[in-house]
Image (cartoon, grey):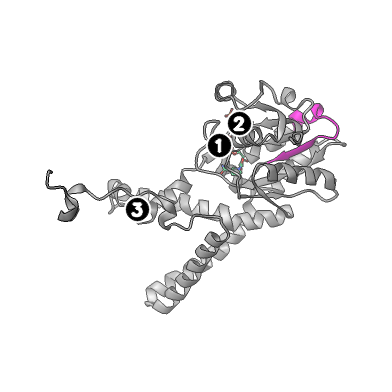
Amino acid sequence: MISAPLIDRLALIGAGLIGGSIARAARAAGTARTIVVTARSPQTRRRVVELGFADQVTETSAEAVKDADLVIVSIPVGASGAVAKDIAPYLKKGAIVSDVGSVKAAVMRDMAPHIPRGVHFVPAHPVAGTEDSGPDAGFAELFVNRWCILTPPEGADPRAVERLKAFWSAIGANVETMTPDHHDLVLAITSHLPHLIAYTIVGTANELGEVTESEVLKFSAGGFRDFTRIAASDPTMWRDVFLHNKDAVLEMLGTFNEDLSRLTRAIRRGDGEALFDHFTRTRAIRRGIVQLGQDSARPDFGRAHGGLPMASLPRPYASDDD
Ligand code: NAP
């Protein structure tokens, strides 16, 4: 028996990595009968038509949300308040408005005042992504086995929350609910601070006097290149994250600086025991992430390694006819 799609009309505002992945996933899973997409620029809208992951591409957000049962705003968090204001007069009674922003308290503060009575507001954050952006970057499997955190405001209709949960589950995500402030604190340490550190270290390496830029690139496999992946993330998105999750990031940065000072002191004093104990604890955290299925168990993130040069193969493997 084929069950009816969960959502009749899904409207996506923003068609980048996240909006484009939601559209592709909803289509692949048959979660929405009609998928309507809009984006700010004509170039992106044209590209969505070419890529064909929407049933309809509209010029304005107002047209996109008309008659939609679920509206997901998938744009940088700094722009979400203005978009909520734009779409408010066109929302259908009973519709659910959600988002995907990496920060929750500020987005709720900016969007909630514009959501009309009779429309359900249930913010969300899929904790999944890559360093790429734009409509070409999305793919249907992005959310599979990743967490999506919902932060419903107090008094939200439980049926609307359940419906949004079901939507994210249908496209492969595991769903958890928490308060926006707690979300912002958790993500400050698991996502925002790591990005800040990556942006810092890549910038620092670029400014070194004694090590040339070509040496940094050449020997990057020593650890640097894993930071460069994160530091290649979208500048607009990340500017907005730090501007909108200022307090939680500053709190975590304070703790981080204390820990960095402790490790600095251990290096200066030659305290090998302190360094060894610390590194043993962090190794266990990596193993925990793998055990929870949140990363590959294969070493070096499962990267493919090239074959050995033929000339170095031992003699018995080479043919006599060579
Ligand atoms: P993206 O690939 O850069 O796409 C952003 C989309 O937003 C584009 O369609 C863009 O339209 C539109 N947009 C940009 N500025 C806008 C504005 N001022 N007003 C209206 N539309 C605007 O970004 P993304 O990675 O999908 O991120 C979107 C949201 O998802 C962000 O809030 C981010 O915090 C959250 N998020 C991202 C990740 C990640 O890893 N990237 C993970 C989880 C959540 P044009 O193309 O026409 O400019």
Of the pair 215 and 280, the residue shown nearer to us: 280
Q: Which residue bears the numbered disc 2?
A: 15
Say if disc 2 is inside 8 Å of ligand 1: yes
Please state the extent of the stretch shown in magenta in the rendering: 85-99
> Pointer 2: residues within 10 angstroms few (<14), some, or many (20+)?
many
Decide: is 53 above or below 205: above
The N terminus lies in quadrant: top right
Decide: is 251 above or below 104: below
Q: CA distance from mark 2 to mark 1?
A: 12 Å
Of the pair 235 and 311, the residue shown nearer to us: 311
Of the pair 22 and 178, the residue shown nearer to us: 22
Name which of mark 2 and mark 1 comes first in the sequence. 2
Q: Which residue bears the numbered disc 1?
A: 139
The C terminus lies in quadrant: top left
The circle on residue 221 is: 3
Q: Is residue 89 magenta?
A: yes
Question: Can residue 300 be seen in the rendering of this structure?
Answer: yes
- Mark 2, secondary structure of its residue: loop
